[in-house]
Amino acid sequence: MLNLNSIMLGTRKPKVLADFYEKVLAKKADWSEKGWYGWKMGEVSFSIGEHSEVEGKAKEPQRIIFNLETKKVKEEFDRIKSAGARVIKEPYEMGGMWIATFADPDGNYFQLMTPWE
């Protein structure tokens, strides 16, 4: 079986996105080197770096959405909104789970969601 190792978010403005995600994740990057930034999140790494073929805002931001798990979706929603994330969808319940959707400065979507039972 294959294991998910990492998620890389390409951008032309890695420092802007790194600063944004430091606020969202409420911690500094675990590592940074030559315009790349990374966080260890459970078994998966999340990294941000410059990509030569990425230009401007995400054209289909809903194509890939990564989820950040928390039991406190409503509280984290308020914190992340105040950190400058653009709200796509306020917290809502679906199948017993709470979900909220945001966009980062490049327009990429990410969600808060309660843990899967």
Image: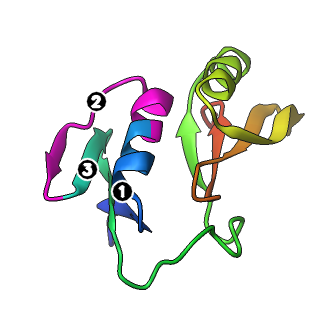
In this figure, which residue is indicated by the disc labeled 2? 28
Kindly identify the amino acid type of the residue bearing the numbered disc 1.
Answer: Pro
Q: Start and end of the magenta stretch?
A: 20-34
Residue shown at the point (75%, 37%) measured from the top left: 100
Residue drawn at point x = 67 percent, y = 72 percent: 63
Q: What label sits on residue 2 in the rendered view?
A: none
Q: Please tell me whether mark 3 sits on a helix, a strand or a loop.
A: strand
Q: How far apart are marks 1 and 2 (CA)?
A: 14 Å
- Residue 34 appears at what percent x and percent y? 14, 59
Look at discs 3 and 1 and give the one toward the viewer.
1
* Picture disc at residue 37: 3
Is 40 situated above or below 64? above
The front one of 59 and 113 is: 59
Amino acid type, callout 2 = Lys
- Disc 3 to disc 1, how far (Cα)? 8 Å
Q: How crowded is mark 1: few (under 14 residues within 10 Å), some or many (20 or more)?
A: some
Are the residues flagged by discs 3 and 1 in contact, CB closer than 8 Å? yes
Image quadrant assignment for residue 97? top right
Residue found at the very far bottom of the displayed protein: 53
- Residue 23 x/y as whole percent: 46, 28
Q: Is residue 13 above or below residue 37?
A: below
Task: Work out whether residue 100 or residue 79 is closer to the camera in this orientation and state it.
Answer: 79
Mark 2 vs mark 3, CA separation in Å? 9 Å
Which mark is first along the chain, 3 or 2? 2
- In the displayed structure, does residue 53 sit left or right of residue 113? left
| Image x and y of residue 93, in percent | 86, 33
Q: Mark 1 points at which residue?
A: 14
Dot 1: element: helix
Quarter of the picture containing the C terminus is: top right
Q: Which residue is drawn at 39% across and 38% down?
A: 19
